[in-house]
C-alpha cells in the first residue's frame, strides 16, 4: 500500500516576495497552475512557452487569479538553439536574479518528429531544451543563491533506458520508449546538476507529478488511448498535479536536500537507472556534444 494514502495533504503559506521564478510550459496544465500558485505567493513569475497566443492568455489568467501583475512571458522551446539562446541572452540582460527555475514543459508519446534543430521531439523538448536553458542561466542561478532547479519528470522513467548510440531515435523509434528515455534523462540531469552545484546554495529536484488530466496525452492513440480512458477517472486534476512541483519549489525543509526524486509531495525512490552516476555523466557529455556547448 502506498505510504502516501494516510498522510495529510501538503500545504504551505510560504511567501516568495522578492523572488523571481521561471517556468517552462506554463501556458497550460500543471505549469499554469504552478505559475498561479507561485504568483499568489508574491513571486515575479516568468512564463516560457512556445505558443504566443496561449502564453498571453495564460499570463492574463495568472495575473487575474493571483492579483499579482508581476508576470511576463517569453519564447519557443521547440526551436532549441536559436530561441533558447535568444531568450537566455535577454533574460540574463534584463533579470537581476533567478531564484527558482522550473523545467516543466514536455511532450508525451507523440509521433516521430524533430525539433527545428533536428532533435527527436521528445528528447529535444523534454531533456535537451531544458539542459540548454539551464546551462545558459547557470551563472545567474548561482549568483541568486539560495536557489532551486525543479525538473518535472515522470514515473515513466522507471521503464526508460538511455540509448547513447541513438539518443535521437534515428535508427528506430518507439514513442513510449522515447518518452521514458526522456523522463529518465530528467532524473539523471537533476542528479548531475546536484553534484556540480555542491556548496553553491543551489539545490535540484526531479519529480513525478502524478497521472494528471491535461492535454499532454493529446498524442495518445490506439492502445495508449484506451488505457488512458480506463484510468482517467483516477487522474489528478491540474491543480493537484502541480502540488509536487510547488512543494519542491517552496518547501523550507528541502533546503538541504538535492538531486533527489519526489512524488505526492514527498521524497521517494527513483529507479536504479536513475541513480547511475556513470550513465548520468555519459548523458551529460553527449548532451553537450549534441548542443555544441562546453559545460564541465
Image (cartoon, helix red, strand yellow):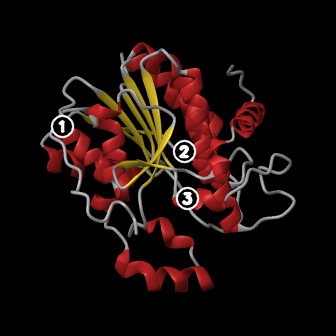
Given this view, does label 1 or label 2 mark the residue nearer the observer?
1
Decide which of tag 3 and tag 1 comes sooner along the chain: 1
Mark 3 neighbour density, 10 Å: few (under 14) some (14–19) many (20 or more): some
- Is residue 136 in sight in this rendering? yes
Residue highlighted by disc 2: 77
Decide which of tag 1 and tag 2 comes sooner along the chain: 1
Q: In the displayed structure, does residue 34 sit left or right of residue 17?
A: right
Residue 84: x %, y % from top left: 56, 34
- Camera-side residue of 72 and 278: 278
| Quarter residue 295 falls in | top right
Mark 3: which secondary structure? Answer: loop
Above or below for 86 versus 228: above
Q: Which mark is residue 107?
A: 3
Residue 61: x %, y % from top left: 22, 52
Q: In the displayed structure, does residue 52 sit left or right of residue 242?
A: right
Measure the C-alpha gap from mark 3 to mark 2. 11 Å
Amino acid at each position: 500500500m502506498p505510504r502516501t494514502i494516510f498522510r495529510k495533504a501538503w500545504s504551505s503559506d510560504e511567501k516568495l516576495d522578492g523572488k523571481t521564478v521561471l517556468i517552462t510550459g506554463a501556458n497550460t496544465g500543471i505549469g499554469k497552475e504552478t505559475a498561479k500558485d507561485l504568483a499568489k505567493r508574491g513571486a515575479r513569475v516568468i512564463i516560457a512557452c512556445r505558443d504566443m497566443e496561449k502564453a498571453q492568455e495564460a499570463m492574463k489568467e495568472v495575473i487575474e487569479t493571483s492579483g499579482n501583475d508581476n508576470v511576463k512571458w517569453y519564447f519557443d522551446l521547440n526551436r532549441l538553439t536559436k530561441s533558447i539562446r535568444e531568450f537566455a541572452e535577454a533574460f540574463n540582460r534584463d533579470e537581476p536574479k533567478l531564484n527558482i527555475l522550473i523545467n516543466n514543459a514536455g511532450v508525451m508519446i507523440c509521433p516521430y518528429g524533430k525539433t527545428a534543430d533536428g532533435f527527436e521531439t521528445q528528447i529535444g523538448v523534454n531533456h535537451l531544451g531544458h539542459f540548454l536553458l539551464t546551462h545558459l542561466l547557470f551563472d545567474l542561478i548561482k549568483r541568486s543563491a539560495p536557489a532551486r532547479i525543479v525538473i518535472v519528470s515522470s514515473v515513466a522513467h522507471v521503464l526508460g533506458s538511455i540509448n547513447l548510440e541513438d539518443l535521437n531515435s534515428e535508427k528506430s523509434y518507439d514513442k513510449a520508449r522515447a518518452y521514458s528515455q526522456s523522463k529518465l534523462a530528467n532524473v539523471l540531469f537533476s542528479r548531475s546538476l546536484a553534484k556540480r552545484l555542491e556548496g553553491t546554495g543551489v539545490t535540484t529536484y526531479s519529480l513525478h507529478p502524478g497521472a494528471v488530466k491535461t492535454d499532454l496525452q493529446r498524442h495518445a492513440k490506439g492502445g495508449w488511448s484506451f488505457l488512458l480512458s480506463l484510468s482517467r477517472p483516477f487522474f489528478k486534476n491540474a491543480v493537484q498535479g502541480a502540488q509536487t512541483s510547488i512543494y519542491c519549489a517552496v518547501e523550507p525543509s528541502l533546503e538541504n536536500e538535492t538531486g533527489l526524486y519526489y512524488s505526492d509531495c514527498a521524497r521517494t525512490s527513483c529507479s536504479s537507472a536513475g541513480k547511475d552516476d556513470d550513465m548520468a555523466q555519459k548523458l551529460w557529455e553527449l548532451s553537450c556534444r549534441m548542443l555544441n556547448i562546453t559545460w564541465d
